Amino acid sequence: MNKIVRGVTNKLLICHLILCPLSAQALDTETKEDTIKAIYSYKFGKFTEWPTSKLNLNSMGFCILGTNPFGQSALDAIEGKPIKGKTLHIKFFASGLLSSDALPECHILFVSQSEKHRVQTIIDALHYQSILTVSDIEGFSGNGGMVTLINIENQIRFEINPDNVKKAGLLMSSKLLGLAVIRHNGLEPSP
Amino acid sequence: MVACSNVFSSFNTTSLIKLHIMLFCWLVLYGFPLALYADNEVDLSEMSIEELMNQKVVTASRTEQNLSDTASAVFVISQNDIRRSGVNSIPDALRLAPGLHVAKIDSSKWAVTSRGFNGRFANNLLVLIDGRTLSSSNSAGVFWETQDRVLEDIERIEVIRGPGASVWGANAVNGIINIITKNSTDTQESMVSLIGGDRNGISARQGWQFADEGSARVYAKFFRQDGLVDENGNDAKDDWHMSRGGFRLDWVASSQHTFMLQGDAYGGQIEQRLNLPSITSSSAINSVLDTADTQGANLLARWEYSQSLASRLSTQLYYENLRRDDRIENEQHNTFDFDFQHEIALNQSNEFTWGMGYRFSANEFAKSGLVRISPKSHDLHLASAFLQDKLTFFNQQLELSLGSKFEYHSFSGFEYLPTIRMLWKINAHQRVWAAVSRSTRVPSIAERHAEIPFAAIPQIQSFVVLQGNKDFKPETVISYELGYRFWSSDRFAFDLAVFYNKYDDLIFTELASPTVAGKIPLKIINGEKATTWGTEITVNWHPFDWARFQFSGSYLKMNFDQFQSSALSAGSFPSNDKRDPEIQFSFRSSFDLTSSLEFDYWLRYVDAIPDIEVINANQQPSINSYVAMDIRLGWQPLKEFQLAIGARNFNDPQHLEYLSEIATFPVQVQRNYYVQAKWTF
C-alpha cells in the first residue's frame, strides 16, 4: 500500500514541481497533509545544492525540531530515501532543543508548529550554517526562514525566501523558485 | 418524560449492555450510509491515532515530549474530548482519563485520585493549572469546586498516573493532573456559551491581538448548580453558585523573550448538608444545613528566554489568595511561589534540565469550625532544586532519564526524591518503558496541628477528637512501573501500564490518654505500611473516520500492614484502605453522523467500595458498584453556532458515588438532562 501511495505521490509531486499546482484532494485520500509536507521538504532538498564542506558525511540529516508533526507513513515516505547520492536519515529533537554538535548532521531542518514563538532564536542560532529550513509556521520565510509550507483550501503551496537561502550558502534551482511564491524578509509575498 | 424515566429506571446492567449493542448496530447500519452522504470535509479537530500518539506532553519531565515517547503512564484529555463528553466541570472531565477515580460527594464536592487513597482531602495527587499548584501541602487536597475556567479555553489536560516527584516535588506521589489553557493567540474570536439543565450558566470570552507581538483574552463565567438528592430522592439542599472572571496576556517581546501574565478571581456560595457530631442528640449526630463562602484570586507571570537553540530558561512567579468559611473550616491562605528552570542540550544525546523553586505561604485559621488548628497561624517555607539528565543511546532508540528533586520544607525538613526512567523504542509502532522512583507526601497543617472532634459518644458525654501530631513524618513511597504502547497505522492504539508501590509511614491513629473530660483523643501517628499494585489499559480504535471508540480499564489492589499495632492503636483515620474501587471500566464512542451532526455515548463502570469507613452517618451506607451512561447529540448548523443536548447517568435515576471522610451526609447523583449552546463571532 505504502508503495502505491508513494508511487502516486511521487508522480504527482514531480508533475507538480514541473507543471501544475497540486491539490491535496487530487491525491489519494490516504495521503494526508503531513505526508505531503514531509515529501515536499525532502523534494526541496533534491533541488538544493549544499557547499561541499556540508557533504562530508555518509548520510544527509532530516532534523525535526519540536513536537513531531509527522505520522509514521509520512516518516516512512522519506526515511532512507536517496538525496545527493546519500541516504536521508530522520532525527528527532522533540523538546525543541538542538545542541550545536548536532548541526553539522542536519541538512534539512523542519521546524514544528510547537516552536512558533522561538522562530527567531532558531534562525539566529543557525545563522551561518548551511541548513535548509522548512516550516509550516505562518510567516516563517518572512522572518528569516527559507521555505514556508502553506495550506490554502486544502492545497499545499510554498513560499521561498531566496535571500535567506543565499545567506546560508545554499543554492536553489531556479525551476523550484519559479514555482514558489517569492518572499523577502519582513515583506508581504510578491506574486 | 416521566414515562421515559420509568422505562430507564427499570434497566439493569444486562439490559444496558443490550441497549449498548443495539445502539452500536443501529449506528453501523444507519450511521454508515449517513456518513457516506456526509461532506468530504473531515473535522480537523478530531485527532487521528498518529496525532494522538504525537501529542505534546510537558508534565512528565518538564520538557516537551511526544506522548508516545513519554516514559510514564500518561493520558491527554483534549479540548475535543471535553466538548464531546458533554461535561460541565473540570473534575467531571477527569473521568475521561483511564485509571483516575473521580467520584462526586455532593453537588459541589469531588474526590479525585489515581492509584488509591481517594477522599475529599486526597493529597497524593499533584494538581496544576498553567503551572500553578492547586494542591499544596498547606491545606489538604484540592477544592475542586473552585477550580474552573471557560471550558472552551482549556487546550488540554495532561494526566500522569504514578509519581512525578523528581521534577515536581513532594505530593506528586500517585499522579499529576496538569490543566493547560490555550495561548491567547488561539482564542481571538468572541464567544458566548450557555448551559442549561442541572447547571444553568453563562460564559463569555473576548480576545484581542496587538500587532504581531501580543494577544490577550478576558473571560467571565457564572453558573448556578442544582443540588443532588438523598437516598430517598429528596433534595439534599446542596445548591451552589460561583462567579469568576479572569484574563490572560501573551507577549512575544523579541526573538528570544516571551511573557505570559494571567489572573483569575472567583467567589461563590455553597450550600451543604453536614452531619456534625453531637453529644446532646441520641443519634450522636446533628444534621445541619450550612453555607460555605469561598473566594480566591491569583496572578501568575512567566518569562521564557530562549538563550540559544540549545538552551532555554523560564522563570515563573505567582501569588494566590484563597479563603473558605464554613462549619468545617475557616481558613485563609496567601501563597507566593517562585520557579526557575533551565533546559540545555549538552550534546546530541544528552539533555540536561535543572531548576529551583521557593514557596512561602501564610496560612490563617479561625477556631470556629469542626477543624480547629492551633496555633492559628502558620508560615510555611518550601525551598527546592532539581536535576534531570536525559541520555539517548543506539541511534535514539534507547532513552535513559536520571534525576532527583531536593526539597526543604518547614514540616518535613530535607527530602530527596530520585527517579530513574527508561524508554525503548522497539520499532516505529512499539514502546516499552520502565521506572523506579521515590516520593513523599508532606504532612498537611491539619495532620500536624488540628483538633477535629469528628465523632460523639452521647452516653458518656464525650467527643472523639482527632489530634494532629507535631512529630508526624512524611509518608514515603517507592514506585516500580512498567509500560507498553503499541499502535498501528491510523486505526488502533493500545497502552498498558503496570505498577507496584511500597508505602511506608502511612497515617494511622492511636488512643492517647485523655487530658480533658469529654474528649477522647486519637493521636495521628505514622503507623501503617502498604503495598499496592495494579494495571491500567487504554485502547483507541478508529474503525472509520466517522467512528471512534475508546476503551479503558483499571485494576487496583491494596494490602495494608500495621506496624504500630499496640493495645492503643485505633486504626487509620481517615481510613487508608477501603476508599477506592478495585475495578473501573470506561467505554466511549464518538460518531460523526453527518458533517454537522455528532453522537456520543459513554459507559462507565465503577466497582463497589463495600466497607467505606464513614463517621456520623445515620447508618453505615455501602457504595455499590454502578454503571453510568452518558449520551450526547451535537449539532453545528453554522460555523459560528453549536448546539448540544444530552443526558448524564441516563440509565439510572440515582446512585451513590462516594462519601466524605468527615461530617458525612450521603448524597446521590441523579440522572440529568442538559442543553449547551455556543456562539463564536
Image: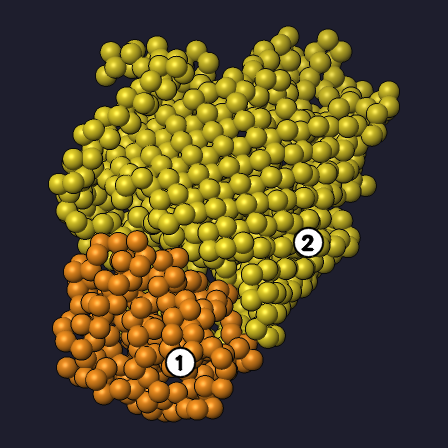
In this view, the residue in front, B272 or B565, is B565
Residue at 40% of width from left, 16% of height from top?
Answer: B13
* For residue B82, side relative to residue A125 (left or right): left
Residue at 62% of width from left, 10% of height from top?
Answer: B283
- Residue A15: image quadrant is bottom left
**Regarding mark 2 in the picture, which secondary structure is present there?**
strand
Q: Alpha-carbon neighbours of circle 2 within 10 Å: few (<14), some, or many (≥20)?
A: many
On-image quarter of the N terminus of chain B? top left
User: Is residue B295 visible to the viewer in this orientation of the structure?
Assistant: no
Q: Dot 2 corresponds to which residue? A: B419
- Residue B418: image quadrant is bottom right
Q: Amino acid at mark 2?
A: Thr
Q: CA distance from mark 2 to mark 1?
A: 45 Å
* For residue B208, side relative to residue B232 (left or right): left
- Residue B118: image quadrant is top right
* Colour pattern of the rendering: by chain
Query: Relative to residue B458, is residue B74 depicted above or below?
Result: below
Q: Dot 1 corresponds to which residue? A: A85
Report which colour depicts chain B: yellow
* For residue B235, side relative to residue A3 (left or right): right
Q: Position of residue B680 (x, y in %)?
A: 22, 51
Residue at 32% of width from left, 89% of height from top?
Answer: A171
Q: Amino acid at mark 1?
A: Gly
User: Is residue B153 visible to the viewer in this orientation of the structure?
Assistant: yes
**Regarding mark 1 in the picture, which secondary structure is present there?**
loop
Question: Looking at the colours in the rendered structure, which chain would you say is drawn in orange?
Answer: A
In this view, the residue in front, A89 or B305, is A89
Mark 1 chain: A
Q: Position of residue A66 (x, y in %)?
A: 44, 66
In this view, the residue in front, B538 or B74, is B538
